[in-house]
Amino acid sequence: MYSGRLVFSQVMDHLPYKSFARIVNKYSGDYKIQHFSCKSQFYCMAFGQLTYRNSLRDIIMCLNANQNKLYHMGIRGSISRNNLSNANMNRDWRIYAELAQVLISTARKLYADEKFSDQINEPVYALDSTTISMSLSLFPWAEFRKSRGGIKLHTLLELPSSIPTFIDITAAKPHDVNILDRIILEPGAYYVMDMGYMDFTRLFRITQSGAFFVTRAKRNVLLKRRYSLPRDKSQRDILSDQIVFAEKESSYAKYPAVLRRIRYRDPEEGNVYLFLTNNSDLEASTIAALYKGRWQVELFFKWIKQHLRIQTFFGHSLNAVKTQIWIGVSVYVLVAIIRKRLNLENLSLYNILQVLSVSPFCYDGLQQLFTDDRLHEWI
């Protein structure tokens, strides 16, 4: 039964507090802290994410304007721009990175019943990265190009739930393909990547692990056909389906096995794509559908850049930037958890965030807030 608590407080109820306390103790986050704990820091930053605040000053002014509600929100001690800025700069960002991983683990269990297709029961992941531009004068450690800085957000997104299972924040200069060395591969899983990740050594590592990959072939890669697979003539978009191997000796030494090459024509745009995979069992049309599903990670990047505060940073140190990004990811996953726990599948994450952004100080029940008939008329 609803007890008349603030909407923001009800959202924070879905945090795993025991795990959060364990992580804070692990990194001594509250060591010698008397007034502004890691929990209060997370609440302030999460409030900024949920309500689209543009700066630390914006967050503090909005919260202090509702001073009589801070205790009921779960924020203890006096809050100020200086307190929040120092916390972001000095408290270990790994506290919030590990909290995000705990939330991701919870979300994956909740969305475990969602499968990519009837033909595929194993996990399907889309891998990609996005560059977040930064000013070199404000972030001198983020060297990218002569005139600007930047960092990269590498993400392994589970399909179709759009839950990020792996996230890494790196400098913008190194090539994307290097991130494959840091991913723990799951046997039987499918990894869908763009041509930027095509590296024979790393692709062979995926094959050796018992996993599958789907990627686009680069134009300059020389592959020799060994034989063609029988093709369903009713699938006119599949132009060819062949077993191939690397023609150059140096390439074959890196990938000493056969590959499957599928030439596919997009029926909507007419563009022709060349896919490479190490899976020989799935239908060619399913391989094409797997690669098409990769666009969900592009939409994920677009979504979080538009609706979470990860492009305008509230602090200039690397620790502050990573803290803000990981808290933003935590808020995204937390909303996904709430969506599943409250059976709000008819609403998108964007719709849920829209409602939460204007109602943190309301006393409506969270379930009631999203089941109001008028809400569905507006959406």
Image (cartoon, rainbow, N blue to C red):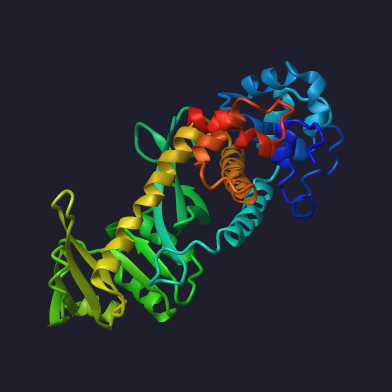
Reply above or below: 95 against 183: above
Direction front: furthest residue: 373
Residue 202 makes an appearance in the image: no
| Quadrant of residue 200 within the rendered picture | bottom left
In this view, the residue in front, 366 or 298, is 366
Say whether residue 130 is left or right of residue 166: left
In this view, the residue in front, 314 or 286, is 286
In this view, the residue in front, 175 or 278, is 278
- Residue 158 place in picture, x, y as percent: 47, 59
Give the residue drawn at x 35%, y 56%: 294
- Residue 361 place in picture, x, y as percent: 71, 25
Say whether residue 3 is left or right of residue 60: right
Give the residue drawn at x 41%, y 40%: 302
Give the residue drawn at x 59%, y 28%: 357
**The N terminus is located in which quarter?**
top right
Residue 1 makes an appearance in the image: yes
- Residue 89 place in picture, x, y as percent: 66, 36
In this view, the residue in front, 236 or 180, is 236
| Quadrant of residue 7 within the rendered picture | top right
Reply above or below: 111 against 143: below
- Residue 121 place in picture, x, y as percent: 45, 72
